[in-house]
Image (cartoon, grey):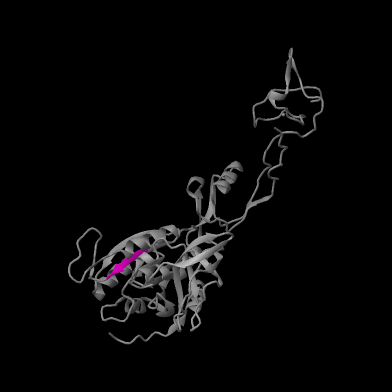
Amino acid sequence: MRASTYPLVDADEAAALVLERTPVLPAERVALGEVVGRVLAEDIRAPAELPAFPAVELGMAARILTGGVIPDGADTVVMVEDIQPAGDGVTVPAVLVPGTKLHRPGADVRAGELVLTAGIQLGPAEIGLAAALGFATLSVYRRPSVALMSTGDELVEVGRQPGRGQITDSNRWALLAALREAGAEVRILGIAPDEPDALRRLVVDALQDADALVTSGGVSVGTHDLVKPLLESLGTVHIGRVKLKPGKPFTFATLPQGKFAFGLPGFPVSSLVTFEVFVRPALRKLQGFTRLQRPTLAVRMGYDARAAGDRTEYQRVTLRREGAELVAQTTGSQSSSRLLSLAGAHALVRIAPGDQGIKAGTIVDAMILALP
C-alpha cells in the first residue's frame, strides 16, 4: 500500500465540480418513433391550428362521425341519441347552445403557439402532440456513449465458480443497469487486466468512440490499483478522493477531445452510491436535462442515524407510510460491501459530517430511488 497524494474533497464540492466540467452533448434529428425518453433540444411552435378545421347552416343538419369534419357554417353538434328521425330530416332538442360538443379550429392549439419547450423529456403525450402537428423528426440531445470496465485479475465472470481469492464480477452488471436507466448507450469492455500497458491499450481504444469511461475498482492505493495513474497519463484527474461514505476513493478526470472518466470504488455499495451522487447527474446533463438530481421528499426518521465524522454519508433506507407521512427505516448494516443494504431500498438519506447525526423523529429530505 502507498499513501494517497490526492486531497480529500468535500462531497458537495466534488459533485459541483463534476457538473461544472460536464458539457451538454450536441443535438441530432431523430425520427419520431425513436425519441421516447430523449430531451427536446429546440422549442416547438404549432405550424397550424389544431384542430385544423371545424368539426359539424342555419336550419340544416348533416350526419358526421365522432371527431369528423363539421361542414362550414355549423356551430353545434347533437349526439345521435338526442335526435329523433323525421322523414328526410331530424328533430333536435328545442334549446341548443352554439358551440356545444364541437372543437373550433385552434381550440386546442393556435397557429404559432409554443407547445413544447426545449429541455423537456419526450413521453407519449409530447410525441403524440408532435405527430398531430406534422413533425416527423425532432431535434433532441444525443445520448452519451459510455465504455464500462471492471478492473482486477481477482474477478471472474458471472456463472463461473470463483477460485480461492477470487470474486464474481457483480459491479459490471449493476452499473450496466444503472447506466442504461440513466439514458446512456453502453459498450461493455469486460474485465481489464492488472497490467499497465494492456489496460492503457484497452482504454485508449474504447475512448475512440465513447464520450466517457466508467470503471469499477482499481482506484484505491494498492500497488495493483492502476486506474488513477492511467487517467493521470491520459488527462487531468480533478478528484481522487472524496469525503463520502461509502465511496471515498471516487475519481473524476477530464480527457482530451472533451471526454472524461469516472473511477468508481470496487465495493458494490460504494460503486452504486457514487454513481447516484456523481455520475447519474452528469449523464443527465449530457443529455440536456434541466433537472439533474433525483427527486426528494420529506421523510421522518424512524431511527437514530449516526454521523460519519468528517465524511458525508448516504444511508440506505426503506420507507413506510404512517398517515400522511413517510417514515424512513434503516436497511440494516450499512457496510460498503453489503449490497443487500441497497437492494429494495426506497431512498438515500444524507447524513452531514460531524458528530451530531440525526435523531429519530427528525424530518429530513430523502433522495428517492423508488416509492413504496
Task: Say if the magenta span includes residue 150.
Answer: yes
Is 223 or 206 nearer to us in this picture? 223
x and y, in percent, of residue 324 in the image: 59, 60
Task: Write down the quadrant of residue 323 in the picture.
Answer: bottom right
Q: Quadrant of residue 69?
A: top right
Q: Position of residue 260 (x, y in %)?
A: 42, 71
Image vertical order of residue 176 relative to residue 261, above or below? above
Magenta span: chief secondary structure? strand
Which of 246 and 179 lies nearest the eye of the viewer? 246
User: Would residue 26 be found to the left or right of residue 211 on screen?
Assistant: right
Task: Identify the residue at the far top of this view.
Answer: 87
In magenta, the rendered stretch is 147-151
Residue 21 spot, x, y in % from top left: 49, 73
Q: Name the residue: 43% across, 79% down.
A: 242
Position in image of residue 64 (x %, y %): 67, 25
Locate the N terminus and report the quarter of the image it occupies: bottom left
Residue closest to the eye, 257 or 25: 25
The reply to whether residue 91 is visible in this rendering is yes
**What residue is rendered at 52% in x and 67% in y?**
366
- Total marks placed: 0
Residue 223, quarter of picture:
bottom left
Q: Is residue 208 visible?
A: no
| 85 is within the stretch colored magenta | no
Question: Which residue reaches farthest left?
Answer: 164
Left or right of 89 in this view: 17: left
Q: Residue at x 37, y 78 (%)?
A: 249
